[in-house]
Amino acid sequence: MSRRLDKITDEAAIWFVRAQDAGFSNEDRRELASWLAASAEHVQEYLSLAAISSDVAMSVNDADVDELIDLARKESFGADVIALPDTEQPPVPSRLSARGMRRRAVFAWGLAAAVVMAVAVGLHERAPGFEQYATGVGEQTTFLLDDGSVVSLNAQSTLQVLFDDDRRDVRLVSGEAMFDVVTVVDRPFRVSTGSAVAEAVGTQFNVRYRGSDTTVTVVEGLVDVQSITVSVPSQSASGSTVPRSALLGVGQQARVVSGEVAVVETDVHEVTSWRDRRLVFEARPLSDVIFEFNLFNDQQIFISDPGIANRAISGSFDADDRESFALFLSEAGIADYARHSDGSIELYDLSGSNEH
């Protein structure tokens, strides 16, 4: 065994012992997730120890490898949590028996994704005492947290909060929220989703979590954004480094997709207009715009012609006024519409052309 592998095995043992401790904190979990994400060998050694201790039992066979390869080819791989089967099997072997180097590499990254996602989920599942807030269709709410921070929660969103003497942890389970954070020394304010963690000391920022994608926008102050999923290697095919974290300033936005953190400048007014029940868009696909409208209305809008779904929409709209929006689309030549007896609005392409 090489000195490098000896070192990895020792580190895996230390992490595994620490993870069994009842005092293993959220910060410890984030550090463990980062260590696992750094190398497929880290994951393999950690799983070997876990299997030996019977905490995790897993068999490696061709069927498992094929499934992981298939998942790895999908762009949405980062959104999938791969369940470890609850069976008694021999420990994970130190060398995988997959067919060829490429096959082993894909398996390793797939395994890494599964383990790191499991650690990330543990950030929420092992923390008792979360207080939950939720909104329904068209509902919005603003509430004061124990530390004086203010949260505005958008329609169809779910938020969980856990504060103690050492931490201020918030989990955005789904949807969107704006945070106006009060500075508390030695108690950073962290908002986590299924794919990212945003940390601030005292600032104002917006977090949106749709599907597996997280978007963080800074209105005031600074926010540190960290990816907690692994879907792609730390280097792209061209050899360039894939960013997994970013420090955002005012007017910056980070989108976390499949483990990668991409930063852009953005219009803060557009991002936060939902608090005034306004929907502001700049060249957004029609399908995205309809999704936002449907958050606010029981009577939904739907597209019957897929060819119009990607047509670009720009403008400012009343979230509660579907009729005016449909009329706008018709007058702009983007789509025609029909009202149905159940109150829904159907959008279609009368011309049969995707040009407008």
Image (tube, rainbow, N blue to C red):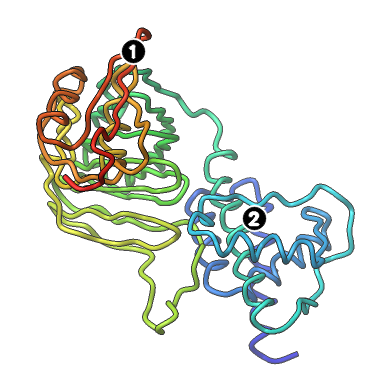
Which residue corresponds to the image point at 25% horizontal and 24% vertical from the top-left? 337
| Residue 17, image x, y percentages | 69, 60
How busy is the neighbourhood of tag 1: few (under 14 within 10 Å), some, or many (20 plus)?
A: few
Residue 256 at x, y = what percent?
A: 36, 55
- The image quadrant that residue 158 belongs to is top left
Q: Tell me how far mark 1 sits from mark 2, CA to CA.
A: 56 Å
**Front residue of 75 and 25:** 75
Q: Residue at x 55, y 37 (%)?
A: 127
Q: Nearer the viewer, residue 34 or 195?
A: 195
**Secondary structure at numbered mark 2:** helix
For mark 1, give the secondary structure. loop
| Amino acid at pointer 2 | Ala
Location of residue 345 by image quarter: top left
User: Looking at the image, is mark 1 or mark 2 earlier in the sequence?
Assistant: 2
Q: Which mark is residue 41?
A: none
**In the rendering, which numbered label is found on residue 340?**
1
Quadrant location, the N terminus = bottom right
Q: Quadrant of the C terminus?
A: top left
Q: Nearer the viewer, residue 162 or 287?
A: 287
Q: Is residue 303 left or right of residue 328?
A: right
Q: Is residue 168 above or below residue 46?
A: above
Above or below: residue 265 compared with residue 296: below
Residue sitting at 50 percent across and 73 percent down? 233
Q: Spot the residue most to the top.
A: 341
Q: Residue at x 37, y 9 (%)?
A: 342
- Up the image or down, 120 lies above or below 69; here it is above
Q: Position of residue 303 (x, y in %)?
A: 34, 31
Disc 1 marks which amino acid? His
Query: Which residue is tagged 2?
Result: 19
